Image: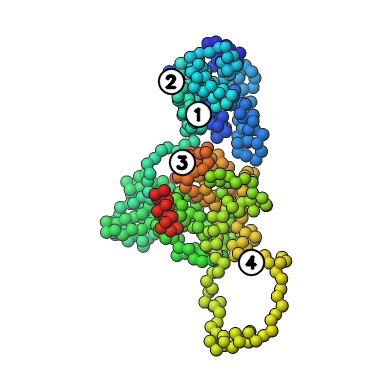
Amino acid sequence: MENLSGAIAPKSRLKVSAKVKTFVLDTNVLLHDPHSIYKFEENNLAIPVEVLEELDSIKSEQNTERGRNARRVHRILQELLPDSRSMHEGVELPNGGTLSIIINPYLTDVSRTSPAMTRLRAILPDLSKKDNRIIASALFVQEQYTPPVILVTKDVNVQLKARALGLESEDYLNDKVPETPEEMGYRDIPVTVYELQRFCSEGEFDIGKDSAEGLYLNEYVLLRSDEGKTMPARYHGEGVVRRLHIPEFVKAPGGIAIRARNLEQQFFMDALLDDSISLITCFGKAGTGKTLISTACALHQTQDDPSRYDGVSISRPVIALGKDIGFLPGSLDEKMKPWLQPYFDALEVLIPSKAPKEPQFAAKKVSKKKHKKHHESALSAPPQPTVSHSGPSSAPPMKPYERLIRSGLVEVEALCFIRGRSIARRFFILDEAQQLTPHEVKTVITRISEGSKIVLIGDPAQIDNPYVDSRSNGLVYCHNRMKGHALSAHVKLSKGERSKLAELAADLL
């Protein structure tokens, strides 16, 4: 093996075996998961020096996840590679693999060439691009070693270019959930009509180990008899299912009553109102009621039992759909208002400005005669001087839900400032959680203190974040890792209730 000024050294510790692979990491993999270095088992790991250069340009980003991850990668590499010799020869990792920094000599000495580099320069002539240089380094490693060399990158275009050059390339799959077929949000459990009657009277029933096989703790099921009678239930382990405990309706302070419109919404309300569940993940397409029901149940509990929660916290990731319009002016609340407008819409529905008056506060009826007399006296009265409203008093009247925000009962959270916080006795709603990475979701959930509940809602089919997909986003990852634990529950909403048009568009477009 040749030693070409910083290339792979003669005493390289990289393993050569039919069972060992060599993985070349792209920058975006390290930014996505700084600890990915330890997750390639007993294989060789190679990092092109161009990756270090890209990390150097990103590490100065303040208050961004990319900047923090870049700095974290630098600290890990500094610890693993303390001197020049270890960097060139490579080091053994705790998991049994090896790590080396790769410098491609063909990029510094254009007089030297190889078949692979000749093909690269013919297909990708612009070697000033970092992506092309990283591919070139992976090709150099492929020439030096017989084991399979795989370029790992989250950039689909880089994967395609590498494959065009005969280099195997794949996505970073460590944090992706297993690919499973589409399934309903609940399971049907067959029972006899007598067993169903017993369940209704006693509130719980043992369905047996055969029927409970494959069920996880707090999973929602539907008991169905041969006669077509049904009853919703929640699995509590050891083959036992129990009846749901939900009120006839939930109501925000000073608002209107909200009832579940379908079976899945009943499941969702049961989880939201259960004090024993601290984490809820909810999948649902647009219009299924994720936002409205979670907000209604949160406000209902602050009113029904003020000692349970001190208030409701609402947040969502700031990721735009389509072209960004730039920075938003104003205070933090003013900047977050466009992003949280769906929740203001939900609060407007729950607590309308013109809520129907209760019977005891209804205005007394006025007879036609009195009304006519009052109208005539008003016409005969002298005109009153007009009062100018150009001053501060001309401000529009405060909406009912705005009082909740000003009182602190409803709080708007910015995710970028949540690190280091400890959120106690709050009902925390995180909308559009499918836009977050698994690490970001972990950061949010680890802020939740004793006495708080967090609800992650979103649609895994609607993702605008270029760094995650339907199997690697934080919402799906969190559900996959947390299901089966007593503190967590999962609900899938599939039936749209917003309007027939919204339901049709969600299914067909």
Q: CA distance from mark 3 to mark 4?
A: 43 Å
Q: Find residue 21 and report its horizontal and vertical position in percent.
A: 46, 22
Work out how far the residue at label 4 is from the one at label 2, CA to CA, in angstroms: 72 Å
Q: Secondary structure at mark 1?
A: helix
Could you give the CA–CA distance between mark 1 and mark 4, rounded to whole angstroms? 55 Å
Q: Earlier in the sequence, mark 3 or mark 4?
A: 4
User: Residue 470 bears which disc, if any?
Assistant: 3
Tell which of 188 and 94 is nearer to you. Answer: 188
Q: Nearer the viewer, mark 1 or mark 2?
A: 1
Residue type indicated by callout 4: Pro
- In contact (CB < 8 Å): disc 3 and disc 4: no
Question: Which residue appears at 42% of the width and 37% of the height?
Answer: 178
Residue beneath disc 1: 158
Residue occupying image coordinates x 31% and y 59%: 229
Instruction: Identify residue for label 2.
Output: 19
The kind of residue on which mark 3 rests is Ser
Whether residue 44 appears in this view of the structure is: no
- Name, please, the residue furthest toward the left: 226
Image-based side of 29 in relation to 243, left or right: right
Amino acid bearing label 2 = Lys
Lower sequence index among marks 3 and 1: 1
Residue 306: x %, y % from top left: 58, 62
**Label 3, residues with CA under 10 Å away: few <14, some 14-19, many ≥20:** some
Query: Mark 4 or 2 closer to N-term?
Result: 2
Can you give x and y, in whole percent of width and height, for residue 330 in the image? 67, 52
Question: Which residue corresponds to mark 4?
Answer: 397
Q: Position of residue 424 (x, y in %)?
A: 61, 52
Mark 3 or mark 4, whichever is nearer to me = 4
Q: Secondary structure at mark 2?
A: loop
